[in-house]
Amino acid sequence: MYFCSLLKGTPMKRSNVKALLSSTETNRDVLLKGWVRTRRGNNQVAFIAVNDGTTIHNIQVVADLASFPEETMKRVTTGSSIRVTGKLVESMGKGQKVEIQAEVSEKEPNGKRIYTEQDKLEFLQKKNPELAKLKTRFNLDFDD
């Protein structure tokens, strides 16, 4: 899963959550890689809490759902890793000083894909046909 900006030219330097949360400089482009802690929102916007391990605090990423493919947003779940590019802006909400307004391009770099828990289970089932028998025998439900 990638959120990528349309910026061209020199590649952006990767930022970390700790530096972004303590930053006083806003309205600048940032690149962040980390893991999704939570995702919430409505039909128009998604609020994604991202952490990269540099601090216990998360930074909020705001993604306009109209700008992102639905298939891409379905894969943004708790625990998935993402790459976010966007603008660091002052937060309009309570609880944080800054947030990232995510931007998207039409092409994913390198064609890499983030695997979800469901993808991992499907892979295991293909590699080990006995898993399907065990699933039935012990009444296990992996399809949630």
Image: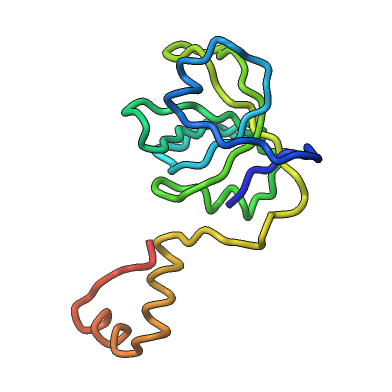
41 to 96, vertically: above or below? below
Task: Left or right? Give the position of 77 relative to 43.
Answer: left
The answer to which of 87 and 45 lies nearer the viewer is 87
Q: Is residue 40 left or right of residue 144?
A: right
Q: Is residue 23 above or below residue 79?
A: above
Q: Give percent across and percent down for residue 129.
A: 35, 89
Q: What x and y, as percent, mark residue 87?
A: 66, 25
Counting from the top left corner in percent of width and height, residue 98 is at: 53, 16
Counting labels gives 0
Q: Image quadrant for the C terminus?
A: bottom left
Residue at the image position 33 percent from the left and 68 percent from the top? 142
What is the quadrant of residue 139 in the picture? bottom left
**Image quarter of residue 17:** top left
Tell me, what colour scheme is on the image?
rainbow
Q: Nearer the viewer, residue 52 or 65?
A: 52
Q: Nearer the viewer, residue 13 or 123?
A: 13
- In the image: residue 126, left or right of residue 111: left
Work out whether 71 lies above or below 57. below
Position of residue 88 measured from the top left corner of the image (x, y, whole percent):
61, 22
Classify 141 as above or below 59. Answer: below
Q: Quadrant of residue 43?
A: top right
x 75%, y 39%: residue = 10
Residue at x 62%, y 30% (from the top left corner): 30
Q: Name which residue lies at 55% across and 21% down.
A: 99
